[in-house]
Amino acid sequence: MNKSEQKTSPQRWLAALPVFNEVQYVANILDQVVSYATDVLVVDDGSSDGTAEILAARDDIQVIRHEQNQGYGAALTSAFRYTIEHGFDGLVTLDCDGQHQPQRIPEFIEAAGDADMISGSRYLKNYDGDDAPPEERYAINRRITNELNQRLGFELTDAFCGFKAYRASALQQLDITDTGYAMPLQLWVQAAAAGWSVVEIPVPLIYLDLERSFGGALDQAEARLRHYHQVLDEAVAEASRQGHAFPSRAPALSIR
């Protein structure tokens, strides 16, 4: 049998959802996710509202449980580690609060054939029925996204969308330490430093949880923005200490 006749092994992709007190959404979302992903992981970040019991009753998912709430970044880091340790070729991450449509999982996986990371964007395309984002959250997203582009050489339109796909080979290059909602800023800096190819694809703008808490003082927009700047500055400084210069590399982002 020559090389052209050899069959390639199918890619193994994992879909992972960070969850914290999502009892009202989790069952319905997981029923949809398992229709579009063979392997599904839920990282339960210390839920205390009955979410853990719902997860324990299912036999079609894998669960990692943090006994104490550690934060959004910590939950995603657990998913990254699981992807690598279990030999998956890639990972799709999505939220469990109804903001991300599970039927789009195959689209993310397909797009990842051409990139290290596929990042959903709520601002690339207008969909019928799009929600209006909370004004303060939108303003912070716009400001931070613009700063990332200026400092890292990207051309992003949405820095904070959690609907993403990653090649496992790229995940191995990360050293994420931020455990909270600022984790994406550290991620973008490390992706730029590693020279990742990034593709943004459009997703609908859905806001069901308008009262999300970012934790204590971070619920105040000004405090959250200061925290984001601190995390971004520290990540860039660390990358610079390792010999990376921004935005000297050519942008590796394309938009579909």
Image (cartoon, rainbow, N blue to C red):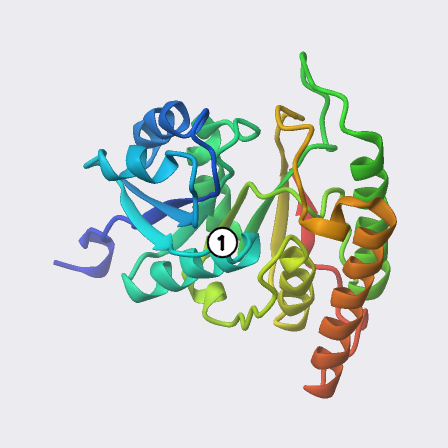
- Give the quarter of the image for residue 204: top right
Q: Quadrant of residue 185?
A: bottom right
Residue 186 vertical placement versus 90 (above, below): below
Q: Relative to residue 98, is residue 59 drawn left or right?
A: left
Residue 46 in the image, given as x and y percentages of width and height? 43, 50
Using the rendered view, name the quadrant where residue 240 is placed: bottom right
Residue 32, placed above or below residue 57: above
Residue 65's spot in the image, x, y percent?
35, 53
Q: Residue at x 76, y 42 (%)?
A: 157
Residue at image location 36% in from the left, 30% down from the top: 30
Residue at position x 80%, y 73% in the image: 248
Q: Amino acid at mark 1?
A: Asn
Quadrant for the N terminus in the image = bottom left
Image side of residue 99 versus residue 24, left or right: right
Q: Along the horizontal axis of the image, is 127 left or right of 177?
A: right
Task: Assess disc 1: are there few (<14), some (14-19) or many (≥20) residues with their C-alpha within 10 Å of its C-alpha.
Answer: some
- Say which residue label 1 marks: 69
